[in-house]
Image: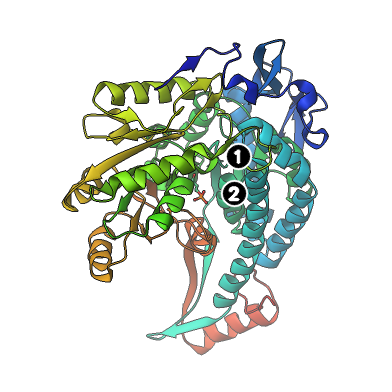
């Protein structure tokens, strides 16, 4: 049964929160982090306008009460400032004639490599802010940082490969041509709160290295961690190439889109906001969108599944980072023959997850950064209970302030909100099925189409399922949880789940367009082209080979 403790009142969950003295020295805060500037046109511009307070999901316990830690503040820019930052990015692109878009690829690679070097210096600070700002456990925060660095270095290798492929001429039907990928213009890059560094960088870096300029608007949570990186952006890129703004999306991203000066919208969040931003563009046909939006990935546990694998993959798939991953398993369909066995092992493992703070050894569940989330999750649980489901893991669904104990709901049916809504938190709906047509119908009717995980041993059944599912979702995981990585694999979705495909190599394509220089193959043209190439007179028309 669910129990609630109002914020500020210590309860059963309340002793989870440390006292100020209980924070390990390495992770203790030296004071509030006040971000007083933003990055525009290669300069840190001071801001003395309104600020937004940032509260950590981590609470501190004092004299029997708990309070959220005030972590810092960031600027709430308005439309005029946002538009003037955009003007810097637009000028730096210079209709494709700016220093950055015309710079030989080797130069752009050097700039990004310098940035990566400078970024690595900020690892401890960024990891600490990830832990405090979004409640990500230390190991995952470190992984987010390191995975991002690896993504950037892999991107540099992929760009070299792409450039090598473009360093040759093609001749067809009497036309000779050099075909390369050229940048598109200004990118507006907006990441999500659950991977505020990684998922912003996985669009920003490919956009920049391909010669676009960019404006970054950090997610709603996970904002302060951009502060330690601003100087690296300023110092490693020409002025106006990489810009960072702060504020409310509706007040700064909307006017930016409305200006018509954005060529690529890279957005990870809800499809509702993505649609609203896209619709602001006065010439939507000029806008390319790369979107990562909602998902409700199901797991399907077949009667012959290896339960130990299914249970451990489903626990981690549903509850890593408290279920706050777009790729999380958000509903589990279990065949009726194994439902009880699965559930009892699943609940045992869920209840063995250690609740704690991001720095707690072996922690499995941490506080949630979205202030309304515990209340929302409680509503989902109540709705399911009213319609016949129960919280089947003892103690599941209790919450105190920002902490919510994982709740396993069973049996979840179509009438319940937990069947349809993307909970993005530690509530795990489990449904039972008799006929495989039932989970397949779920996938067909779902507005989402990112991934699915199937657990079973019979190759005939698994093969049949794979063939039925690959045209509904974009990744079918066999006896494995859903996930984005490795980052060299394509990451995308159908229906309301995504637009465009990301991976180290795909992202380079997303942020560029095939462009060619072509000439009829005659002596006159050959001579001109040879002269340009031999004299290294053009950055585009060139056979230089990056080693
Ligand atoms: O939130 C969505 C992320 O792209 C998921 O990535 O599967 O590596 O956690 P992940």
Q: Residues within 10 Å of mark 2 (few under 14, many from 20)?
A: many
The residue wearing badge 1 is 216
Residue 271 x, y percent position in the rendering = 38, 37
Q: Position of residue 408 (x, y in %)?
A: 39, 35
Q: Residue at x 23, y 50 (%)?
A: 337
- SS at mark 2? helix
Residue 481 shows in the view: yes
- In depth, the one of 46 and 310 nearer the eye is 310
Q: In x, y percent, where is residue 102?
A: 64, 60
Label for residue 176?
none
Tell how many labels. 2
Q: Residue at x 44, y 35 (%)?
A: 424
**Residue appearing at x 67%, y 55% in the figure:** 149
* Quadrant hosting residue 48: top right
25 with respect to 380 (left or right):
right
Who's the residue at 56% across and 20% down the image?
12
Name the disc covering residue 204, or none. 2
Compare marks 1 and 2 and give the one earlier in the sequence: 2
Please state which of residues 357 and 475 is positioned toward the viewer in this rendering.
Answer: 357
- Is 546 situated above or below 400? below
Under circle 1, the secondary element is: strand
Q: CA distance from mark 1 to mark 2?
A: 8 Å
Q: Quadrant of the C terminus?
A: bottom right
Give x and y (percent) for residue 242.
Answer: 67, 45
Q: Quadrant of residue 360?
A: top right
| Location of the N terminus (image quadrant) | top left
Do the residues bearing badges 1 and 2 touch, measured as CB atoms within 8 Å? yes
- Horizontal placement of 507 versus 237: left or right? left
Q: How is the image coloured?
A: rainbow
Q: Depth check: give the residue in front, 30 or 526.
A: 30
Residue 295 visible in the picture:
no
């Amino acid at each position: 049964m669910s129990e609630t403790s109002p914020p500020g009142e210590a309860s059963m969950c309340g002793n989870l929160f440390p006292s100020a003295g209980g924070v390990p020295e390495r992770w203790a805060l030296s004071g509030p982090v006040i971000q007083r500037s933003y990055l525009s046109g290669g300069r840190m511009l001071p801001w003395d306008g309104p600020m937004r307070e940032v509260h950590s999901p981590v609470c501190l316990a004092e004299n029997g009460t708990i309070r959220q830690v005030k972590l810092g503040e960031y600027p709430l820019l308005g439309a005029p400032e946002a538009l003037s930052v955009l003007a810097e990015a637009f000028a730096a692109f210079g209709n494709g004639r700016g220093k950055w878009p015309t710079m030989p690829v080797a130069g752009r690679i050097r700039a990004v490599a310098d940035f990566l070097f400078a970024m690595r210096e900020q690892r401890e600070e960024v990891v600490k802010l990830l832990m405090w700002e979004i409640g990500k456990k230390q190991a995952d925060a470190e992984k987010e940082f390191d995975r991002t660095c690896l993504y950037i270095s892999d991107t540099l290798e992929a760009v070299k490969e792409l450039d090598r492929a473009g360093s040759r001429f093609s001749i067809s039907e009497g036309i000779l041509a050099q075909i390369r990928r050229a940048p598109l213009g200004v990118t507006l890059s907006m990441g999500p709160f659950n991977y505020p560094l990684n998922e912003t960088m996985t669009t920003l870096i490919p956009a920049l290295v391909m010669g676009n300029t960019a404006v970054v608007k950090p997610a709603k949570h996970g904002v302060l961690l951009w502060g330690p990186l601003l100087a690296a952006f300023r110092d490693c890129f020409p002025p106006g190439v990489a810009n960072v703004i702060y504020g409310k999306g509706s007040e700064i991203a909307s006017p930016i889109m409305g200006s018509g000066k954005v060529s690529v919208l890279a957005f990870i969040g809800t499809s509702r906001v993505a649609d609203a931003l896209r619709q602001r563009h006065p010439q939507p046909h000029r806008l390319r969108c790369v979107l990562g939006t909602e998902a409700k990935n199901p797991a399907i546990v077949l009667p012959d599944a290896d339960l130990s694998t299914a249970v451990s993959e489903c626990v981690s798939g549903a509850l890593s980072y408290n279920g706050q991953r777009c790729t999380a398993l958000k509903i589990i369909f279990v065949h009726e023959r194994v439902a009880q066995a699965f559930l009892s092992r699943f609940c045992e493992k869920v209840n063995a997850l250690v609740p704690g703070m991001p720095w707690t050894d072996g922690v499995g569940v941490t506080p949630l950064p979205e202030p309304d989330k515990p209340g929302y999750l409680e509503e989902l649980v109540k709705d399911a209970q009213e319609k016949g489901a129960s919280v089947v893991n003892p103690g599941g669904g209790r919450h105190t302030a920002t902490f919510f104990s994982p709740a396993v709901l069973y049996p979840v049916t179509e009438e319940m909100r937990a069947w349809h809504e993307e909970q993005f938190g530690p509530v795990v709906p489990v449904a039972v099925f008799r006929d495989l047509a039932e989970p397949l119908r779920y996938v067909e009717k779902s507005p989402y189409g990112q991934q699915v995980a199937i657990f079973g041993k019979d190759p005939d059944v698994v093969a049949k399922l794979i063939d039925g599912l690959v045209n509904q979702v974009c990744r079918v995981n066999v006896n494995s949880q859903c996930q984005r990585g490795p980052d060299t694999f394509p990451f995308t979705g159908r229906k309301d789940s995504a637009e465009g495909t990301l991976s180290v190599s795909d992202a380079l394509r997303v942020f560029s367009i095939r462009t060619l220089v072509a000439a009829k193959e005659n002596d006159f043209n050959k001579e001109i082209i040879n002269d340009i190439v031999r004299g290294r007179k053009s950055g585009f028309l060139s056979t230089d080979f990056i080693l």
